[in-house]
């Protein structure tokens, strides 16, 4: 990988680590899931409500399917398809779904954050 790619991967990992730490330190009563594009929250959803959400990233689009309190990525436009291979996540997941080419992170959060 090129130096810029390593820096991007490192930045995403640091951001994801900070989000995990923040989530662990601020556990509350209600759970939501936040979808970040870069540093901006572009979607927040209740994992208990079944739905499919469309998100646009830097490389292309992706869909998030929510069903029975769990979610996963489907129909993503990126070269590696790693985010889709991360499988189903739920409210107890500590590792966020990360799509580096699209600059998207999907992480568990507490309601009202």
Image (cartoon, grey):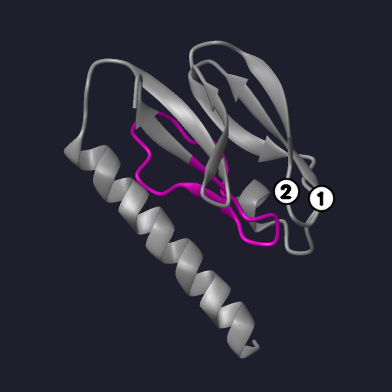
Q: Which of 13 and 41 is in front in this view?
A: 41
Instruction: Say left or right for 14 vs 42.
Output: left
Q: Where is residue 89 in the image (x, y as percent from the top left)?
A: 48, 36
Residue 27 in percent (x, y) is at 21, 29
Can you name the residue that lies furthest to the bottom here? 2
The circle on residue 92 is none
Which span is picked out in magenta?
86-106
Callout 1 environment at 10 Å: few (<14), some (14 to 19), or many (20+)?
few
CB within 8 Å, label 1 to label 2: yes
Q: Main secondary structure of the magenta part?
A: loop
Q: How far apart are marks 1 and 2 (CA)?
A: 5 Å
- Seen as rendered, the residue at the extreme top is 49
Residue 93 in the figure: left or right of residue 56: left
Q: Of residues 90 and 20, which is closer to you in this image?
A: 20
Q: Is mark 1 on a helix, strand or loop?
A: loop
Residue at label 2? 57
- Point 32% across, 54% down: residue: 18
Q: Relative to the observer, which residue lies in front, 41 or 30?
A: 41
- Local SS, label 2: loop
Q: 77 or 43, which lies in front?
A: 43
Q: Which residue is drawn at 80% across and 40% down?
A: 75
Q: Mark 1 points at which residue?
A: 60
Tell me the crowding category of disc 2: few under 14, some 14 to 19, or many 20 or more residues within 10 angstroms, Cα based.
many
In the picture, the quarter occupied by the C terminus is top left
x 71%, y 22%: residue: 52
The percent coordinates of residue 50 (x first, y second) are: 61, 13
Q: Position of residue 60 (x, y in %)?
A: 81, 50
Q: In which quarter of the image is residue 99?
A: bottom right
Count of marks, rendered view = 2
Q: Is residue 50 left or right of residue 70?
A: right
Q: Which residue is drawn at 39% across and 64% down?
A: 14
């Amino acid at each position: 990988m090129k130096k810029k790619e390593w820096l991007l991967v490192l930045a995403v990992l640091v951001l994801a680590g900070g989000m995990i730490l923040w989530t662990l330190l601020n556990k509350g009563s209600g759970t939501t899931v936040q979808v970040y594009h870069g540093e901006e929250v572009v979607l927040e959803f209740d994992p208990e409500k079944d739905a499919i959400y469309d998100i646009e990233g830097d490389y292309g689009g992706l869909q998030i399917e929510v069903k029975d309190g769990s979610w996963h990525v489907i129909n993503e436009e990126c070269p590696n398809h790693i985010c889709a291979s991360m499988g189903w996540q739920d409210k107890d997941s500590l590792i966020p779904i990360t799509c580096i080419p699209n600059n998207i992170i999907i992480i568990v959060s507490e309601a009202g954050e």
